Amino acid sequence: MTGQFWTRSETDDLIQSYRSNPPHISKSAFFRSWGDAHNKSGTAARLKLDSLLPRPVIGESPYPRYDEPLTMEGDALVLPDIEFPFHHAEFLNKCLELARAWDIRQCIVAGDLLHFDSLSGWEPNWKTPDTGGITASAESQLVEFAKTLGKNQQAKLFGLIGDIGQKTEQDGASTELAIARRELRGLAKQFDKVDLVIGNHEGRLLRALNTTLDPEELKRLLELGDKWRIAPYYFSYLISNGEKYCIDHPKSAASTTAAVLAAKFGCHILMGHSHHFSITTDVSGQYFAAEIGCIVDEARLPYASQRHTRAPAHSLGAAIIRNGSPTILTRFTDWERLLKS
């Protein structure tokens, strides 16, 4: 009779290792790997486990569990609803300047990184007349060339560029993506790590494609580098000085949503999506709950600015979590005071 005896420690380790096996590793790969590590064949490991565990009547679902959202540790700048290329550059630059002054090296984009106006369901917009001129790219190249000339010739060329004017860019996904890629490269230079939460505007891309999409495909579409992380979730977590914050882009934009989510999930909530600003707590008063506004420029959104509605105005806002405490940034922020603190 041939075969190998199994020790109690081996059988215990086999059961424990199997139960903690990550879902992305197949059973056959697990048995093969475990067997190699214990000088046994994968088949022997599988048969032994079958004899140790009762065979379940119902098998596991083959579909993934969505229980591993992005989690970042430390301090971070939180930027909600930038919606490139309709962003409010002045406000965003103030946020970035403060993050540099405070040595904040991480960033979380709380959904709606791009606007995807060309994929929106809003009715077509009235346009301003195209006055001709040169493209922004061509203008930039001419300006760089002008800098190589003598002062007299440089002044003449700058004057000529001003007289010609800049061409009005036409809407379209290609234009939006080109502008966004340029700005995202600049954003990434400032940070060591950037987490991207999915928002409803990214959902416009899914609706246009009418198919599922791997989040990594969005990274490739935007030409994002290794500093960027993205997962198929509309929220992520930040753990700062032991405090847990959920950076959320929820389905509901109701004024009570942040407080409800804080109570439901037992953590602080920083919420995008609503474009509104409010600070409260959950019903227990234990968790901070805030709508932190947006960084999209309302004046650049035809649906919000060309026709009056009863909807509240968009509120510029962002947040910095430092040493576990939130600093909410708004149009009322005393930037000079914070820069010195």
Image (tube, rainbow, N blue to C red):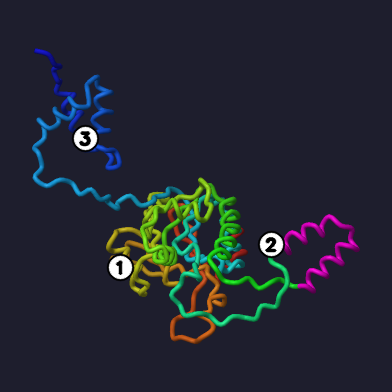
Q: Amino acid at mark 1?
A: Val
Identity of the residue drawn at 54% across and 84% down = 306
Q: Position of residue 287 (x, y in %)?
A: 34, 62
Q: Earlier in the sequence, mark 3 or mark 1?
A: 3
Which region shows up in magenta? 137-164
Q: Label 3: few (<14), some or many (≥20) within 10 Å?
A: some
Q: In the image, which is nearer the foreground, mark 3 or mark 1? A: 3
Question: Of helix, strand and loop, which one carries label 3?
Answer: helix
Identity of the residue drawn at 8% across and 37% down = 54
Q: Earlier in the sequence, mark 2 or mark 3?
A: 3
Q: Is residue 313 above or below residue 53?
A: below
Q: Label 3 near label 2: C-beta < 8 Å?
A: no
Identity of the residue drawn at 71% across and 75% down = 132
As measured in the structure, the alpha-carbon distance from the residue carrying label 2 to the one carrying label 1 is 47 Å
Q: Label 1: few (<14), some or many (≥20) within 10 Å?
A: some
As measured in the structure, the alpha-carbon distance from the residue carrying label 2 to the one carrying label 3 is 57 Å
Per the image, the residue denoted by label 1 is 260
As measured in the structure, the alpha-carbon distance from the residue carrying label 3 to the one carrying label 1 is 38 Å
Per the image, the residue denoted by label 2 is 137
Prevailing SS of the magenta stretch: helix
Q: Earlier in the sequence, mark 2 or mark 1?
A: 2
Q: Amino acid at mark 3?
A: Tyr
